[in-house]
Amino acid sequence: MKAQVSVEFLVYFGFLLLVSSLFLANHLSNSQKLSNLKMEVESQEIADKVSFEINSAVIAGNGYERNFYLEEKIGGFSNYTVEIGDYYVLIDWDGRSKISKASTKSINGTIEKGWNLIRNINGGIYVN
């Protein structure tokens, strides 16, 4: 009788361990998906923010000057780069990228992580 109880206990315990493992694996998978989604959203927000600053400088015209800040890392842990091209801002990280439109291709300088100064001097947009 004791042996039967021990076997039943091991079977129930094994089943419980299997169910718990499956639940944990599913939870970790969902956590990774959520983390990736958060990084996608944050990188798009950075691209939109830089684009907004450029577009504001263009619209405001000569004499516009403003400081703005970009986070050092996406999601607090992933490095990224900012590229400005003809009418776009590109954020690139870990082989992925997000893009946002800019209203001009005439941008001088580079966007850095941390504080940036953007100016409109006689219609030209200058950064840092």
Image (spheres, rainbow, N blue to C red):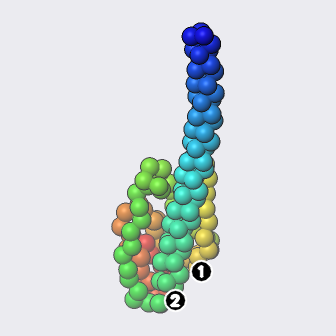
Vertical placement of residue 59 versus 24, above or below: below
In which quadrant is the C terminus drawn? bottom left
Give the Cα distance between marks 2 and 1. 9 Å
Residue 59 numbered mark, or none = 2
Residue depicted at x 58% and y 20%: 9
Judged from this view, the residue extending furthest toward the front is 1
The residue pinned by badge 1 equals: 103
Disc 2 + disc 1, Cβ < 8 Å: yes
Give residue 54's mark. none
Which quarter of the figure is the N terminus placed in? Answer: top right
Q: Position of residue 122 (x, y in %)?
A: 46, 87
Dividing the picture into quarters, in which one does residue 3 lie? top right
Give the answer, above or below, for where 67 lies relative to 43.
below
Crowd tier of the residue under label 2, counting other residues whose Cα lies within 10 Å: few below 14, some 14–19, many 20 or above: few
Q: Residue at x 41, y 61 (%)?
A: 71
The amino acid on which the numbered mark 2 sits, given as a three-letter code, is: Ile
Q: Earlier in the sequence, mark 2 or mark 1?
A: 2
Identify the secondary structure beneath mark 2: helix
Q: Position of residue 89 (x, y in %)?
A: 57, 68
Residue 69 in sight here = yes
Determine the residue positioned at 60% across, 39% down. 23
Q: Residue at x 56, y 10 (%)?
A: 2
